[in-house]
Amino acid sequence: MAVFSFYSGLRLSNRHRKRSRRRTYVSGEDRRNKMEEYAREPCPWRIVDDCGGAFTMGAIGGGIFQAVKGFRNAPSGMSHRMKGSLTAIKTRAPQLGGSFAVWGGLFSMIDCGLVKVRGKEDPWNSITSGAMTGAILAARNGPVAMVGSAAMGGILLALIEGAGILLTRFASTQFPTGPQFAEEPAPAPIPTSPFGDYRQYQ
Amino acid sequence: MPVAVGPYGQTQPSCFDRVKMGFMMGFAVGMAAGAMFGTFSCLRIGMRGRELMGGVGKTMMQSGGTFGTFMAIGMGIRC
């Protein structure tokens, strides 16, 4: 995962990435076919759900990436490569899962707090809590790092929420003849009620 | 996921479809994020002109791939 090696540090970006995926399937998928799908967990349990989901995601994804990385970095010879790959998975994948879980848990904790405080559920909750999570997790690196990390978290969350909104819109308009999406406009009014203040896209 | 069949007897998108959709969506988000952050970091390390384009493109593809992979996994573990 040499991915973001040349910006601000792998860990930071890792955290953002993790949150992103967790979040996205929740918002995009869920609202789209809420009838067939589970709704998001009600609030206190959402934290546990997100935390565990994020851990699983991080561990599996980290396993995949670390397997490749360990394979490539090991000394030549098939047995060395396999062993290096296994070692890399064993050491790094749980770490990545743990940092994903920290991000996910803190994120949805703040999310739930915002839901209670503001009394509504909209994309701004996610964006704010993404930014706050980034800031809190970078708190030990000083104010400048906090601002940078908060901006990163907020921007990422905004992108993801935007993608979810676009997906919802395309799913309801783009496939008017497609058999499986033709029904999507019918469930669409139902998500509106829990997210009553959600006028942007429905 | 209580119901697998919609109101009109249509089946829901299959697991693989959803994983694929998750990957696409993650890829798009990752491309956008990579475009923003990649531009900053490439400018900071002093790339300009054609070199900058290459650097940004590389970052975009990398972050799109990573995001997409993780998002696909995230879809996969829930369906």
Image: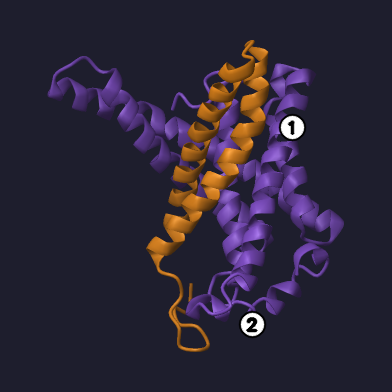
Chain colours: A purple, B orange
Q: Is residue A170 left or right of residue B18?
A: right
Name the kind of residue labelled 1 in the image.
Answer: Ala
Q: Which residue is mark 2?
A: A186
The extreme right residue here reads: A118
Please state the horizontal and vertical placement of residue B38, each as a whole percent of the image: 61, 26
Mark 2, secondary structure of its residue: loop
The extreme top residue here reads: B46
For the question of whether residue A89 can be seen, the reply is no
Which quadrant is home to the C terminus of chain A? bottom right
Q: Which residue is mark 1?
A: A150
Label whose residue precedes the other's in the sequence (2 or 1): 1
The residue under the point 48% across, 32% down is B62
Answer above or below: position of A26 versus A72: below
Gap in angstroms between the C-alphas marked 2 and 1: 38 Å
Q: Quadrant of residue A170?
A: bottom right
The residue under the point 73% across, 21% down is A145
